[in-house]
Amino acid sequence: MHLDLESRVLLSLIAKSSFDKNVEFLQNDEKVEDVNWEKVYTESVHQTVVLFASDAISPYRNYIPEEILGKWIAYSGKIFSTNMFVTNYQNELVNFLDNNDYKYIILKGLSSSSYYEKPDLRMLGDVDFLIENDRKEEIAYKIQNVLKYNLYTDLDHICHITMTRGKAAIEMHFEIPGIPHGENGEYVRQYIKNILDDTQNIDMPDCKFTAPSHLYHGVIILLHMLHHMSSEGLGLRHLCDWGAFVNKTANMDFWSDEFIPFLKQINLLKYASVMASVCYKYMGIDMPESLPIADDDICEEMINEILHSGNFGNKDEQYQQSGLLVSEHGKDGVGKSTFSVLLGQLDSAVKLHWPWLKKWKILLPFAYVYFALKYCWKVLTGKRPSLTSLMPEANRRKELYKKLEIYEDSK
């Protein structure tokens, strides 16, 4: 396993705090004194796993410079404060939905937190929730008028609308994110048609809410992870969400009875297996017997890819922007030509920013030209990298992702 010492330290800290697993990070003649703790801390920030790491550093406090330890503790305090803020406005939202008898589930966020050994250590962002599609206008109207949120995106968005109130942000979904195109997408929609009825009640110290069943939670976070991997970039937080889910449910029957057949049907079994195996090999999680363990080489490539990316590709702008040429957010795998991917990205951008064009399709060609020229202007003014400069990184990523056989027919 060819990872530098600091990466191994970070993964070992995450394994202990997130999964209660002891993973040795020293190799050969290495000593704890050799660890560059500033590098470990910085990487935990890039990967948005600061709390996971800081929770497990107690045995090594004597080796960590006071300055680094101080920054770690201070930043952890800020994240705890943010987590409490998000939890509070989610509680308000959940009470509103329950009091009005609206069906809903919390997507990702605190639903993912509930799978960890210590749920309060997962860093939270905004609140994503799924509601009934045919009631989206009614619910959006009431949230704006009762909870005083402002509409941030149009109601015609492809799968969600965003509403904000000061620093609070909620995403109201009427379809789960990351559903693929074509027949696979139609199969997924049919498969999860009862997602708002097959739920579980989560009771955590600071909040109570309705979450998807284990099966549907697995579908949600796997598609979400694939979406980010194939676009701006996947970080350790997303990988750990998958690892926490796999670890907690490893001995449950739904894997062999329902989830594995689903993964085979849409050709995501190898992808799910590789990502779980990365967590198994580097962070010691438990694996379901029915989920194959991937070989060391592909797991090593994937963990290095994630460490290179950072959360949402935040470690490297070139990497982040290369997602434009890799895939249309993972919805078709990586089998399309670069030109086809670009056309798909252009079409998605136009319909995202100007959803009213769906009713005025005759104007679409003009919109494509406008958005293409707008991008070219940003390249000329240095606000965006050129497509040619992104090509090498995009090609490298595509070659790696092809090994995962995403949405490909079984061989």
Image (tube, helix red, strand yellow):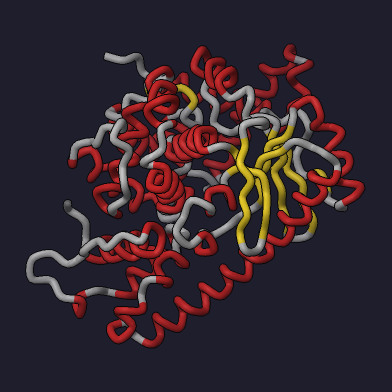
Task: Say which of 319 and 374 sits in front.
Answer: 319
Up/down of 382 relative to 363, above or below: below
The x, y position of residue 131, in whole percent, is 73, 34
The x, y position of residue 185, in whole percent, is 54, 19
Q: Residue at x 74, y 19 (%)?
A: 358
Up/down of 211 relative to 114, above or below: above
Q: Residue at x 31, y 60 (%)?
A: 21
* Number of marks in picture: 0
The x, y position of residue 340, in whole percent, is 47, 19
Q: Quadrant of the C terminus?
A: top left
The x, y position of residue 87, in whole percent, is 67, 60
Asked whether the viewer can see residue 135, the reply is: yes
Up/down of 71 relative to 94, above or below: below
Left/right of residue 314 with respect to residue 409 in the rendered view? right
Residue found at the very far left of the displayed protein: 29
Left/right of residue 273 with respect to residue 236 in the rendered view? left
Asked whether the viewer can see residue 396, the reply is: no
Left/right of residue 5 with respect to residue 92 in the rendered view? left
Task: Say which of 112 and 405 sits in front.
Answer: 112
Up/down of 131 relative to 128, above or below: above
Residue found at the very far right of the displayed protein: 145
Q: Residue at x 68, y 42 (%)?
A: 129
Task: Say which of 253 and 45 sits in front.
Answer: 253
Q: Residue at x 61, y 55 (%)?
A: 125
